[in-house]
Image (spheres, helix red, strand yellow):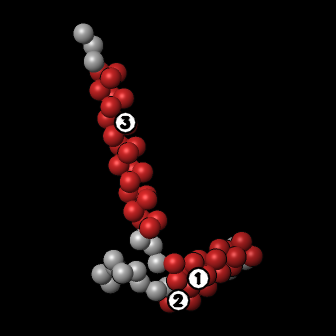
């Protein structure tokens, strides 16, 4: 009997489940205080694509660490 296909389906389903659980945990533990900074950075990127690199440091200075961050 050839069970290779069934094993691959099982491994794929398990990997998908692990990825979904990881994504939910990351979403729920994010620091929502950084949402306005993210919005400003996205707007700056779309408004001035060539000059964004010069502004990037200003945005990273505004980022507040999450409770899980060790830095």
Circles 1 and 2: CB atoms closer than 8 Å:
yes
In the shown orientation, is residue 26 left or right of residue 37?
left
In the shown orientation, is residue 5 left or right of residue 39?
left
Image x and y of residue 29, in percent = 41, 71
Q: Which of marks 1 and 2 is nearer the N terminus?
A: 1
Image x and y of residue 40, in percent = 65, 81
- Label disc, if present, on residue 62 of the rendered structure: 2
Categorize mark 3 by other alpha carbons within 10 Å: few (<14), some (14-19), many (20+): few
| Residue 57 in view of the camera | no
* Residue pointed to by mark 3: 12
Helix, strand or loop at disc 3?
helix
Q: Earlier in the sequence, mark 3 or mark 1?
A: 3
* Residue at horizontal 49 percent and vertical 85 percent from the top: 63
What is the distance, in whole Å, between disc 1 and disc 2 at their CAs? 7 Å
* Residue pointed to by mark 1: 37
What is the distance, in whole Å, between disc 3 and disc 2 at their CAs? 39 Å
């Amino acid at each position: 009997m050839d069970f290779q296909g069934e094993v691959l389906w099982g491994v794929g389903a398990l990997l998908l489940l692990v990825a979904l659980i990881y994504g939910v945990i990351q979403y729920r533990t994010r620091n929502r205080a950084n949402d306005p900074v993210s919005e400003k950075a996205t707007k700056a990127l779309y408004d001035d694509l060539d000059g964004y690199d010069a502004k990037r440091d200003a945005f990273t200075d505004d980022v507040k660490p999450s409770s899980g961050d060790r830095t």
